[in-house]
Image (cartoon, rainbow, N blue to C red):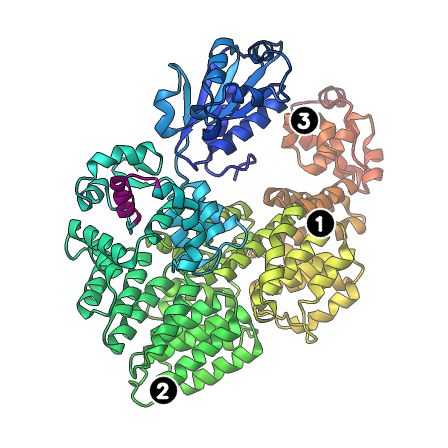
C-alpha cells in the first residue's frame, strides 16, 4: 500500500496531488464521483491534509439530508466558528482573501441552496466536492473535473479485510468479499456486523436482528412494488443479471427507477445490486422462510435448467433431503471454480439420502476446498464425512489431505493425530486393503508434517508407519521419506532420471537436492513447480515450499525477488486460510528486512509469529524466527543478545535443533561470535561437523574453523572457503568468508591483499542490501588505508581503478614518494611503482603533476 494509506487509489491521489498547486488557484471544480462506500470521504480527507501541508487555507463542509432545508447550514461549517456578521459577506471575505484557499464539500448534492448559491457567486479558487454517482448529473457544473473511484480489485479488497481486527478466516472471509463486491465501507461494516467464524454463513435471527433493526424503517417506507423488487435482488446467489432479476418479478420494470432513485439499489452495467450489502441481508432475512424459498424458485425459473446457478437456487429453496437435487448439484459442480465446487458438493452431501453418497460428496468437497487453502473448511468437511460412519467410504487420499491441512494451521501434533486416526480407520474390518500408492501417500503426508515440526516424536511415528506399511520402490517419495527419517546424515544427489517422474516430482526433487546440499538445483526445481502452480491458478496449493524457496533465493543474494514473492504470497493469504504460511513468510520477510538494516520493520514482522505460532511444535519456523531476532539484534549492535539467539539453535551435541542443510545457523554464529567475544563457546559446536555432509557445509565449516579457532591453519582454511570453484554458488556465504578473510589479512599487516577481499565482500553485500554487514566491510576497507570514494569528489575516471590503485594514486597526488607510500601501506616500493604505472595507463597521465591535477586534494581514509 502506498504511503497515503488508501488501497487501490494511487491514480486518484496522484491526480488530486497534481491539482493542489498553491501557485495556480484559479476558480475550478473537481469532483470525486463514486457510488456510496467507495471511499469518497477518505479521499477528500487526504486531499484536505495535503492542501494544508502545501499552504492552503482549507474550508470544509458536508451536506446532510436533515439540514438540506436549513439556509446557511453549509456556510456555518465552512466558516466555523460562525461569524457575527452577515453570512454572505463573511463567506465572500473568506473566499476572496489573499493566499490559496481550498473549499472541500462532501455530499455536495445535500448542501443547502443558500450555501450552494454563495459558492457559485463568490468562489474564486478551487472547490473539491464529493458526489454520489447517481446524483452527479444534476449537481456538477459544466467543465468540472471528475475523478471516479472503481471497486477495489479482489486482491485489494482481500488485503483490506485481512487488516481489520478480529476478522474471521476461511470460508466466512470469502463470503464477506463476495457480498462486499470491492466496496471498502461494505467490507468494514460486514466484518463488524459478523465477527464470528460462521456468523455470515448462517444468518440466524439472533445474529441478523441488529442489521434488520437498522434498516427496518427504510424498508417499511418503500412502496410495495419497490420492496418486491428489492427482496428479489436480495436473493441473488451470484451474478444474476438485470434481465434475470426483472424477469423473476413481473412488472418490476416500473419500479426500477424508484429503487435506484432512493439509493437502495445500484445498477452497474447489467448488474443490479444493493448499494449496501447489509441492506441486502436485512431485506432477505426480514422475509418469512416460505417467501425466501419462493424468491429462489423464481430465480431458478429464469435460469438454464441443469446449470449450477439453477440448481443452487433450487437447493436454497429445499427444506428436506432430495437425491435428484443432490445429484444435479454434484453434476453442476464439476466445471465450477474450486470454491463454488466445494460449496455445491457440501450442499449436495447435506441433501443426500444415502450416508454413502453423502460421504463421497463430502470427500470431493474436501478435496476442492484444500486446493484453495481452506484449512478450517477442510476440517469441517472431514468431520462431517466421519460422522456418516460408512465402512469403506474413507480413502487414504482424504486422510492425507485432512492431515496436511491441519498441519498448515500450525498444529503439528493434531495433524499427526489425524493421520494416525485415519490410518487406524483404514485398517478396520470392512475397509479395502491399502494399495502401494495409498501407503506411500499416507507416509509422505506424515513425512511432510515431520519436516515442518522437526520433532523427534514425529520421526519415530513416521518410522513406525513406514514399518507397518508396504511402501513401493523405487520412488522419489520413498527416498524423501528416508531423508526425513535421518535428516542429519549425508545424502547423495538424486536426479529425476533415477526414478519415474510424475508431474508433482519437482518439489520432492527440490527437497532431495537440498538434503544433498545443492541449493541451486533445489531453487530451480521449486521455481519450476511455482511456474506450474501459476498456470493452474493457485500458487498456495503447496504452501510448505515457500519458506525453503525464499531462503534459497536469499542464499543466492536474490533478496529483491524474494520480497516480491513474499508480497504476492501475502496477497493470496488474505483470501486463504493458511495461518502457518502467513507466519513463515513474515519470518522470512523479517529476516531479509533485518539483513537490510530495517530493524523496525523486521521486529514488526516477527511479532505475529512469536505471538501466534505454536513454536514448540513448529521447529522449522522457530529456527528461522530465532535467526531473524538474532540478525535484528546484530544490526542494532547488541552482539551479546544476537549471539544468545543463535547459540540456542544448537543442542548439546552441537547439531542444530532443526536439520538445516544450508547451515544458516552456523554461518550466523561464525559472524556474531567474534564480535560478542564468544569464539571459544561457539567453537564447541564444531566437532558435530567433523564430516560435513555437503560441499556447502564443507566450505562453511572451513570458514567457521578459520574464524573461531584461528591458529596456523587459518589462512589455508580461509582460502578454501573463498577460492573453491563452488564457493560463489552461495553468494552470502562467499561474501562473508571474503569479509572475514580480509579482516584476518589486515591484522596480519597485509593491507593490499586484505583490500582485495574486503572490497569484493563490500560490493556483494551492498548489492544484496545487507546494510549492517556492508557497514562492517566498509569500515574494514577504510582501515586498510583505502581511498574513500567520497574523497574523490565523485570523479568517474577514478572508478576504473582497483581499490589498491585508488589508494596509491591518492597518496601520490598528495606528493608522497614511493618509499613513503610503501612505508604507510606496509608494502614494497616496487609494488607501489607497479600499481602507479598501471594507474597512469588507465588514467592517461604521464607524471605526478598531471596526476595531482586530475585527482585534486583527495586524501585517503584512515
SS assignment at label 1: helix
Q: Distance between the residues labelled 3 and 2?
A: 76 Å
Q: Residues within 10 Å of mark 2 (few under 14, many from 20)?
A: few
In the image, which disc is placed on residue 480? none
Find the residue positioned furthest to the left: 305
Q: Mark 1 points at which residue?
A: 635
**Label pair 1/2, CB-CB below 8 angstroms:** no
In the image, taking residue 848 as reference, residue 38 lies left or right, namely left
Tell me the mark number nearer the camera, choosing from 3 and 1: 1
In front of the other: 499 or 411: 411
95 versus 334 height, above or below? above
Which residue is depicted at the point 59% across and 27% down? 49
**Of pointers 3 and 2, the one earlier in the residue sequence:** 2
**Magenta region includes residue 222:** yes
**Magenta region includes residue 576:** no
Q: Name the residue under label 2.
A: 427
In front of the other: 179 or 598: 179
**Of pointers 1 and 2, the one earlier in the residue sequence:** 2
Q: Where is residue 403 in the image (x, y as percent from the top left)?
A: 43, 72
Q: Position of residue 385 (x, y in %)?
A: 34, 74
Q: Name the residue under label 3.
A: 794
Residue 420's image quarter? bottom left
Q: How far apart are marks 1 and 2 (CA)?
A: 55 Å
Residue 397 appears in the picture as rendered: yes
Specify the quadrant that holds the C terminus.
Answer: top right
**Label pair 3/2, CB-CB below 8 angstroms:** no
Q: How far apart are marks 3 and 1 (CA)?
A: 29 Å
532 versus 46 height, above or below? below
Q: What stretch is highlighted in magenta?
A: 221-234
Amino acid at each position: 500500500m502506498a504511503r497515503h494509506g488508501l488501497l487501490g487509489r494511487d491514480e486518484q491521489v496522484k491526480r488530486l496531488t497534481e491539482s493542489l498547486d498553491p501557485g495556480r488557484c484559479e476558480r475550478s471544480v473537481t469532483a470525486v464521483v463514486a457510488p456510496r462506500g467507495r471511499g469518497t470521504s477518505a479521499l477528500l480527507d487526504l486531499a484536505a491534509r495535503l492542501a494544508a501541508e502545501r499552504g492552503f487555507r482549507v474550508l470544509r463542509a458536508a451536506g446532510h439530508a436533515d439540514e438540506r432545508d436549513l439556509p446557511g447550514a453549509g456556510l456555518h461549517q465552512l466558516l466555523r466558528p460562525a461569524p457575527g456578521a452577515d453570512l454572505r459577506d463573511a463567506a465572500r471575505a473568506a473566499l476572496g482573501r489573499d493566499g490559496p484557499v481550498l473549499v472541500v464539500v462532501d455530499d455536495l448534492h445535500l448542501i443547502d441552496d443558500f450555501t450552494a448559491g454563495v459558492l457559485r457567486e463568490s468562489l474564486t479558487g478551487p472547490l473539491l466536492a464529493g458526489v454520489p454517482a447517481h446524483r452527479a448529473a444534476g449537481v456538477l457544473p459544466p467543465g468540472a473535473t471528475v475523478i471516479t473511484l472503481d471497486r477495489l480489485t479482489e486482491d485489494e479488497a482481500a488485503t483490506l479485510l485481512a487488516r481489520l481486527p478480529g476478522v474471521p478466516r476461511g470460508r466466512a472471509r470469502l463470503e464477506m468479499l463476495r457480498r462486499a463486491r470491492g466496496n471498502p465501507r461494505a467490507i468494514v461494516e460486514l466484518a463488524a456486523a459478523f465477527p464470528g467464524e460462521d456468523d455470515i454463513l448462517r444468518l440466524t435471527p439472533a445474529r441478523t436482528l441488529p442489521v434488520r433493526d437498522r434498516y427496518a424503517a427504510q424498508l417499511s417506507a418503500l412502496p410495495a412494488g419497490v420492496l418486491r423488487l428489492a427482496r428479489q435482488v436480495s436473493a441473488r446467489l451470484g451474478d444474476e443479471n438485470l434481465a434475470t432479476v426483472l424477469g423473476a418479478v413481473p412488472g418490476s420494470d416500473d419500479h426500477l427507477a424508484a429503487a435506484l432513485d432512493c439509493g437502495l439499489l445500484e445498477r452497474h452495467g447489467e448488474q443490479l445490486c444493493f448499494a449496501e450489502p447489509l441492506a441486502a441481508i436485512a431485506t432477505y432475512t426480514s422475509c418469512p422462510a416460505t417467501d425466501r424459498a419462493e424468491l429462489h424458485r423464481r430465480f431458478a425459473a429464469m435460469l438454464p435448467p441443469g446449470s449450477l446457478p439453477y440448481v443452487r437456487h433450487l437447493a436454497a429453496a429445499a427444506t428436506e433431503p432430495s437425491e435428484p437435487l443432490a445429484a444435479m448439484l454434484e453434476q453442476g459442480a464439476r466445471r465450477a471454480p474450486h470454491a463454488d465446487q466445494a460449496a455445491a458438493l457440501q450442499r449436495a452431501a447435506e441433501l443426500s439420502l444415502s450416508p454413502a453418497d453423502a460421504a463421497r460428496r463430502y470427500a470431493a468437497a474436501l478435496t476442492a476446498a484444500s486446493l484453495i487453502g481452506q484449512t478450517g473448511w477442510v476440517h469441517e468437511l472431514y468431520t462431517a464425512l466421519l460422522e456418516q460412519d460408512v465402512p469403506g467410504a474413507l480413502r487414504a487420499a482424504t486422510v492425507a489431505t485432512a492431515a496436511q491441512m491441519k498441519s498448515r494451521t500450525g498444529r503439528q501434533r493434531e495433524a499427526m493425530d489425524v493421520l494416525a486416526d485415519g490410518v487406524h480407520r483404514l485398517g478396520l474390518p470392512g475397509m479395502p486393503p491399502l494399495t502401494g500408492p495409498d501407503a506411500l501417500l499416507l507416509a509422505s503426508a506424515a513425512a511432510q508434517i515431520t519436516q515442518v515440526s522437526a520433532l523427534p516424536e514425529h520421526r519415530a511415528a513416521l518410522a513406525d508407519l513406514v514399518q507397518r506399511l508396504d511402501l513401493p520402490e523405487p520412488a522419489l517419495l520413498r527416498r524423501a521419506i528416508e531423508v526425513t527419517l535421518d535428516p542429519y546424515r549425508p545424502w547423495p544427489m538424486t536426479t529425476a532420471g533415477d526414478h519415474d517422474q510424475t508431474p508433482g516430482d519437482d518439489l520432492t526433487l527440490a527437497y532431495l537436492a537440498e538434503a544433498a546440499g545443492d541449493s541451486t538445483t533445489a531453487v530451480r526445481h521449486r521455481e519450476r513447480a511455482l511456474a506450474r502452480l501459476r498456470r493452474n491458478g493457485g500458487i498456495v496449493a503447496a504452501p510448505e515450499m515457500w519458506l525453503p524457496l525464499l531462503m534459497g533465493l536469499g542464499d543466492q543474494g536474490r533478496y529483491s525477488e524474494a520480497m516480491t514473492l513474499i508480497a504476492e504470497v501475502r496477497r493470496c493469504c488474505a483470501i486463504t486460510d493458511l495461518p502457518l504460511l502467513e507466519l513463515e513468510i513474515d519470518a522470512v520477510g523479517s529476516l531479509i528486512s533485518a539483513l537490510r538494516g530495517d530493524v523496525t520493520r523486521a521486529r514488526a514482522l516477527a511479532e505475529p509469529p512469536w505471538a501466534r505460532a505454536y513454536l514448540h511444535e513448529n521447529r522449522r519456523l522457530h529456527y528461522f524466527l530465532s535467526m531473524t531476532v538474532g540478525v535484528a539484534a546484530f544490526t542494532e549492535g547488541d552482539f551479546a543478545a544476537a549471539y544468545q539467539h543463535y547459540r540456542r539453535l544448537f543442542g548439546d551435541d552441537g547439531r542444530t535443533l532443526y536439520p538445516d542443510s544450508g547451515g544458516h545457523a552456523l554461518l550466523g554464529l561464525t559472524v556474531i561470535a567474534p564480535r560478542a567475544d564468544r569464539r571459544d563457546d561457539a567453537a564447541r559446536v564444531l566437532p558435530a561437523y567433523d564430516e560435513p555432509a555437503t560441499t556447502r557445509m564443507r566450505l562453511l565449516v572451513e570458514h567457521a574453523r578459520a574464524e573461531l579457532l584461528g591458529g596456523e591453519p587459518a589462512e589455508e582454511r580461509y582460502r578454501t572457503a573463498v577460492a573453491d570453484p563452488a564457493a560463489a554458488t552461495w553468494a552470502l556465504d562467499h561474501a562473508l568468508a571474503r569479509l572475514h578473510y580480509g579482516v584476518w589479512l589486515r591484522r596480519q599487516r597485509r593491507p593490499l591483499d586484505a583490500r582485495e577481499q574486503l572490497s569484493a565482500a563490500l560490493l556483494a553485500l551492498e548489492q544484496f542490501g545487507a546494510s549492517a554487514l556492508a557497514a562492517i566491510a566498509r569500515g574494514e576497507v577504510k582501515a586498510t588505508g583505502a581511498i574513500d570514494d567520497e574523497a574523490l569528489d565523485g570523479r568517474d575516471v577514478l572508478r576504473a581503478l582497483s581499490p589498491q590503485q585508488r589508494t596509491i594514486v591518492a597518496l601520490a597526488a598528495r606528493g608522497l614518494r614511493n618509499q613513503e607510500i610503501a612505508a604507510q601501506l606496509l608494502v614494497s616500493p616496487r609494488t607501489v611503482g607497479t600499481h602507479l604505472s598501471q594507474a597512469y595507463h588507465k588514467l592517461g597521465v604521464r607524471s605526478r603533476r598531471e596526476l595531482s591535477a586530475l585527482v585534486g586534494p583527495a586524501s585517503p581514509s584512515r
